[in-house]
Amino acid sequence: MTQPHSTPGPGAKTPRPATIEDVAKRAGVSRAAVSKVIRNAYGVSSAMHDLVTSAIDDLNYRPRVAARAMRGSTFTIGVQLPQVENGFFTRILVGILSVVSRSGYQMIIAPMVDSMSGAAALESLLDRQVDGIIAVAPAVPQDWMEQLGRRVPLVQIGQHDDPVNYDAVISDDEAGARLVMEHLLGAGHTAISHITNDERLLAEPSTDPHPRRLRVYEDMMLARGLEPHVVRLDEARMDTRSAAREMLMRRPRPTAVFAGHDAIALTTMRVSAELGLSPDDVAIVGYDDVPLADHPLLGLSTVDQSGEEMGADAARLLLERILGRSEAVTHTFAPELRIRRSSASKVAPQANS
Amino acid sequence: MTQPHSTPGPGAKTPRPATIEDVAKRAGVSRAAVSKVIRNAYGVSSAMHDLVTSAIDDLNYRPRVAARAMRGSTFTIGVQLPQVENGFFTRILVGILSVVSRSGYQMIIAPMVDSMSGAAALESLLDRQVDGIIAVAPAVPQDWMEQLGRRVPLVQIGQHDDPVNYDAVISDDEAGARLVMEHLLGAGHTAISHITNDERLLAEPSTDPHPRRLRVYEDMMLARGLEPHVVRLDEARMDTRSAAREMLMRRPRPTAVFAGHDAIALTTMRVSAELGLSPDDVAIVGYDDVPLADHPLLGLSTVDQSGEEMGADAARLLLERILGRSEAVTHTFAPELRIRRSSASKVAPQANS
DNA sequence: ATACTTTTGTAGATCAATCTACAAAATGTA
DNA sequence: TACATTTTGTAGATTGATCTACAAAAGTAT
């Protein structure tokens, strides 16, 4: 196990970390030569390589990212992430990590502190001069993103715009919502509620996945002559819990609930359980397939967006872009329905009064 | 909504972002004056302040972190995090974020890619010249950490060493394990198994929480004349799932399981459910209180380490340290047992053959 | 051997901020 | 009014890497 940077000197008081200058002196060569070696640049003999490498090892030298950033690149990619506590986003993160970790690039995460600070998180990455950015569901207008894409290689995950200056990785939300609705309608449900995000949370209602899922829900209900019933989470007035409670206390009670994403679905299941209801009373389907959704005790039916694959794909696209590609690419993933206990009743229950 | 950095110029091709030089020119003052204004340093008249501020706004100027880092500080704190997908660590992260976000410091996360790369993650933060580091359960020897603490303000979460050059925030793992064992023994269980991490994963067995929980388990079993039964996760040979299965298939079957942490406990519950067992057959208690543990359908009994509070406390300690404190501080949090359905049976079942 | 390439190494400018040292201006005091 | 003190602003050095331009050395072909 090596020491953290530079020569330790037992008990020594913070010896200044070695710089490229120190390495050059030690090896008896120029700074430029050392720089070439650490960058694997053209024009180093193998003798020079060995000489410099051993000097680097001796001094435990590590280049400072800040100094590199002044002229060249930082070999760092930045990930803007909303809600670290949301299992779906961590699935994406794991996917990104799996690609980035074998790429020679370092990854840093800029978490959003509140739902509106996506731009701030992205700018903080830019301030850091990352070589590329993956924006996960940023709540930021598209033209702002286009501006950003002009300055830095950029890949966005989970917003349906049709970007010119960056790549997009999305899931087919219409298809996913259709899978859910076909499943529920096919089981005979007619009283189906939809519980979803507050529209005011959405900076870009036209590109966000949730309005699309909502739209499909409404269309399919109306197409069958059924009346849609939409519950919106209103951060100001009530939390998910009380919204779900209100929804489940309604008479006639919905026999099925399509939740905008798994966190909402799990809370709905929670409330449902607290009210003494079972999956036979109310079928619940979520969206995302968060890690614990498949736990046998939860058994949450949901739409698998395969976050790991989307994350890994986004990372690959970003690396391509960093290497020079400039044509915009959009990849669309096909979602898959995972039917579990929460909606497994074969026959829809009668709506009770 | 502002544009990402600098003047946009509709459709313009990546106009170079404004530098401090540009601001100085625009305001008709020196670079040093601008620098003072953005750092809130001493020696600026209010006229100067306004002049510079409006030039900054006009040009949409943002200081580059790299350039600042060359001489001054980066106003960034780094968090080294193992396993973003583990709910306990995200609890800690949320706590850190709550403090850091109102502090004027930016936060970046360096995730560990595998269980042994804690040192690499920490060094990458150091390369970035963060002003301080929070290390969450780093798998790194203490003397290495001491070296690191000598170079940069440092706070560690979740390792029981007695640091000299950095602060530590820990939970009283002995007390937590005792709570669990008292609970299970008090309910009449005698066949209690303990399932925990592979010891080879632990860089520092003497400071890691898990060996301490194990020790308490063993001691309390032996003190009552009971035979301890420890299952270790062995990454090479088997995963958590098959380890749990093996444990539950054993005859006589344990009537209670104390799991080293919630992820293991949840997998054990999963296997238990798959084997058709109920909480009445096998009581299960975890450790951490991950977000979904209290879901009524899971109802996992566990030890609440109040991750958010620990994270927030660590962040406060780090900010103090950045401001100059150098005496080492160790804060110990008292864990609380949360009894839920998974271990709620009043009477211990008979060990069956 | 000579002329031409190619390879290898170096000097020195450069990046964008901070910070020190100091001069000029303003303010206070006798 | 003269002198001391405080406040305000600036010039220029500094940080640690990269990168360009070029010279020296080594190969190659004639």
Image (cartoon, coloured by chain):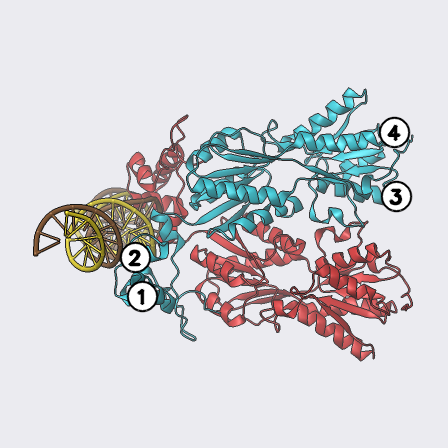
Chain colours: A cyan, B red, C brown, D yellow
Residue type pointed to by label 2: Val
Labels 2 and 1: the sequence-earlier one: 2
- Between the residue at mark 4 and the residue at mark 1, the CA separation in whole angstroms equals 80 Å
Q: Which residue is mark 4?
A: A252
Residue B314 located left or right of residue A77: right
Instruction: Point out the tag, 4 or 1, that comes first from the N-terminus.
Output: 1
Q: Residue tagged by mark 3?
A: A276
Q: CA distance from mark 3 to mark 4?
A: 17 Å
Q: How many marks?
A: 4
Q: CA distance from mark 2 to mark 1?
A: 11 Å
Please, what is the three-letter code of the amino acid marked with disc 4? Pro
Element type at mark 1? helix
Tell me which amino acid carries mark 1. Answer: Leu
Lower position in the chain sequence, tag 2 or tag 4 = 2
* Labels 1 and 3 in the same subunit: yes
Q: Alpha-carbon distance for marks 2 and 4?
A: 78 Å
